[in-house]
Amino acid sequence: MVIDRVRLYPYSIGRISPFRIATMTSYSVDGVFVAIDAGDLTGWGEALPFHSINGETQGTCIEALKFLGQFLIGREFLAVGSLVTALKGLLPTMTTAAGAIDVALHDMVGQKLGVPIYQLFGGTNRELPTDLTIGIVEPEAAGVRAGEIVAEGFRRIKVKLGDGVENDVARVSAVREGASEALIRVDANQAYDRETALVVLNEIAEFGVEFCEQPVRRKDWAGLKWLHEHAGVAVMADESCFDAEDAFGLISGGCCSLVNIKLCKSSGLIGGREIAAVVRNGHGRCMVGGMAETRLGVTASAHLGCSDSAIEFFDLDAHTGHTEDVIEGGLEIVGGRFGSGMSRGLGRGRRRSFWRGFR
Ligand SMILES: [Mg+2]
């Protein structure tokens, strides 16, 4: 079946409260939904650019999606692998835009074959235990929020770092006090040099921390390797790893054994699975996470999470801070776990439109 139309729907959604991480404070979520039509089939994807991580914006994603959309018109969508390879060749650095199209194409194939996306890859349906994230806030507020998160049924809490050694250690300490049984993971979003990161990680180790995402700048692979060898908390590559080539360098170079996959970095599901394969072959483990996507993008990430056994950690809370849920169908968090019951395609059953704003 041939693609006959590509539609773009830019959106802006508020955040319930400002979300502060080491590199920026975010007040709204500005992305683009992409709908690809072939006959009576429509596949949906989502581009959620995060400028401080990969340099893309809503504006650059719109232009990239227009350009890539023109390439798709008239082409057979079942050849999804070769289409995605071609898209990555056309705009190699626009990984968020390419990822949205990759997901929409897989959504179409899933619908056409009558199976959920994870089954296209031989995956297994399972409920994915996700964390909820606490941004950079005062320690006292973090402790209170940790108690609320546990009361909501979550057993995993992610804490953002990057506000100086003293405040960071105090925030993690308060979270541990507020949630004594929870698993705690932290994310420094490139905040530190290696020596300062070592101090922070060794001080928070006593609170029982699973791992720390991206303690150092994304190109500081030597620093990551040094921390992997010396720190009291395991390190995970996030901003350092966009694709399988990065993953191979990081894993084979002994820089880490943990990698965070995001569809907006990996140019979609195919690229995400390539990373997982490299990490699995290197005896490492993966997390699947996101930027700030709506439930559409998070649902796609959950399908990726069900598709490979190397993906053991789940950070599928991107949509939870939004002031409104514009998605119809898809998956939801129930009792700290992100959705079972995935049906065809992205899991939207027989409903016609993912986004209530249209049709
Ligand atoms: Mg991260």
Image (cartoon, helix red, strand yellow):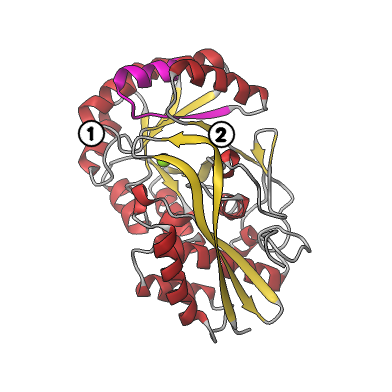
Hey, which quadrant is residue 187 in on the image? Answer: top left
Residue under the image location 43 percent in, 76 percent down? 67
Q: Nearer the viewer, residue 234 or 292?
A: 292
Q: Amino acid at mark 1?
A: Trp
- Picture quarter with ligand 1: top left
- Report how far apart the C-alphas of labels 2 and 1 lie in the structure: 27 Å
- Figure check: 115 above or below 66: above
Please say whether residue 168 is one of the residues in the magenta stretch.
Answer: yes
Q: Report crowding for label 2: few under 14, some 14 to 19, many 20 or more residues within 10 A (C-alpha).
A: many
User: Where does residue 70 sit, x and y in percent of width and height?
Assistant: 47, 81
Q: Position of residue 169 (x, y in %)?
A: 37, 18
Residue 58 lies in magenta, yes or no?
no
* Residue type, label 2: Asp
Confirm or reject: label 2 Cβ below 8 Å from ligand 1.
no
Q: Residue at position x 46%, y 51% from top? A: 262
Which image quadrant is residue 349 in?
A: bottom right
Q: Which image quadrant is residue 215 in?
A: top left
In the image, which disc is placed on residue 131? 2
| Mark 2 residue element | loop
Say whether marks 2 and 1 touch (CB < 8 Å): no
Numbered mark located on residue 50 in the image:
none
Q: In this rendering, which labeled residue sits more in front, label 2 or label 1? A: 2
Give x and y (percent) for residue 315: 53, 40
Q: Is residue 351 above or below residue 162?
A: below
- Left or right of residue 152, residue 237 in this image: left
Extreme bottom residue here?
74
Look at the image and give the residue range highlighted in magenta. Answer: 156-173
**Which of disc 1 and disc 2 is earlier in sequence?**
2
Q: What residue sits right under mark 1 in the picture?
A: 226
